Amino acid sequence: MSILHTRRVEKSFQEGRETISVLRGIDFNVERGEIVSLEGPSGSGKTTFLSILGCILTPTSGEVVIEGNAVSEKSLADIRKRSLGFVFQQFNLFPSLTAIENVEYALNVKGLRNKDARIEAQRVIEAVGLGDRQNFLPRDLSGGQKQRVAIARALAGTAPILLADEPTANLDSQVGTQVLEMFRALAKQENRALVIVTHDPKVRTIADRVVKIQDGALV
């Protein structure tokens, strides 16, 4: 069974008296260890859909099932902590925390603390090649290094699903390629599902499958 799937997911927003339909009946699935590139033009609904997969937004109708459990309003926070790792386009690092402390903080939120959190943070920081930069503040890191910290934060713990929103958008071509290669290696080695929302054609080089969304529907 798919580790994540959706059934007839729809999302609409109210603007005054007008209802704006953003997603239109999306059926989608991803398996453990699979990398999916989710592509589409600006305004197509892909970021909204990723937010629904990440339990940040709830669908207007339809169902999201993660690890065999249907997502509900009550279960959103718990599923985010247990099952999901999110890599944001703008990194979203805490400027006053070092690289390893940013990862530790994410683990604290998930319930892992003290020595156990430090050991796990150390593991993922080294896995993304930043062992020698772990005590640097974000201001002292390059864009590629910040993205690696963001990836380490998403990998920390045992979340089986990783979601990434334009992870190469703020990186030059060479660094972007390195980050994508690291993404693929880590996803395959740790058997985690990875969904990447992107405009970057290089993502196709690491993806097992490309899914296109247009006008709120998969095409």
Image (cartoon, rainbow, N blue to C red):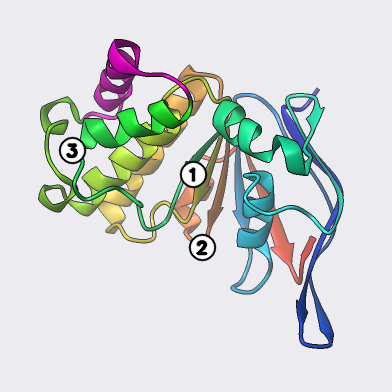
Residue at 47%, 56% (x, y): give it: 166
Q: Residue furthest bottom?
A: 17
Residue at 79%, 40% (x, y): give it: 72
* Circle 3: residue type: Thr
Residue at 68%, 70% (x, y): give it: 44
Q: Which residues are magenta?
A: 111-129
Q: Is residue 34 visible?
A: no
**Quadrant holding the C terminus:** bottom right
Task: Give the alpha-carbon distance from disc 2 to disc 3, as whole Å.
Answer: 30 Å
Q: Is residue 49 visible?
A: yes
47 lies left or right of 89: right
Residue at 35%, 51% (x, y): give it: 91
* Circle 1: residue type: Thr
Label 1, on which residue? 205
Answer above or below: position of 40 versus 14.
above
Label 2, on which residue? 199
Label 3, on which residue? 98
Residue 73 in the image: state x and y as whole percent. 76, 44
Crowd around label 3: few <14 · some 14–19 · many ≥20 (10 Å) = many
- Mark 2 and mark 1 residues within 8 Å of each other at the beta carbon: no
175 lies left or right of 12: left
Q: 64 and 198: which one is in front?
A: 64
**Quadrant holding the N terminus:** top right
> Mark 2 vs mark 1: which is more N-terminal?
2
Tag 3, which secondary structure? loop
Answer above or below: position of 79 versus 150.
above
Q: 147 and 121: which one is in front?
A: 121
* Circle 2: residue type: His
The quadrant where residue 7 appears: top right
Tag 2, which secondary structure? loop
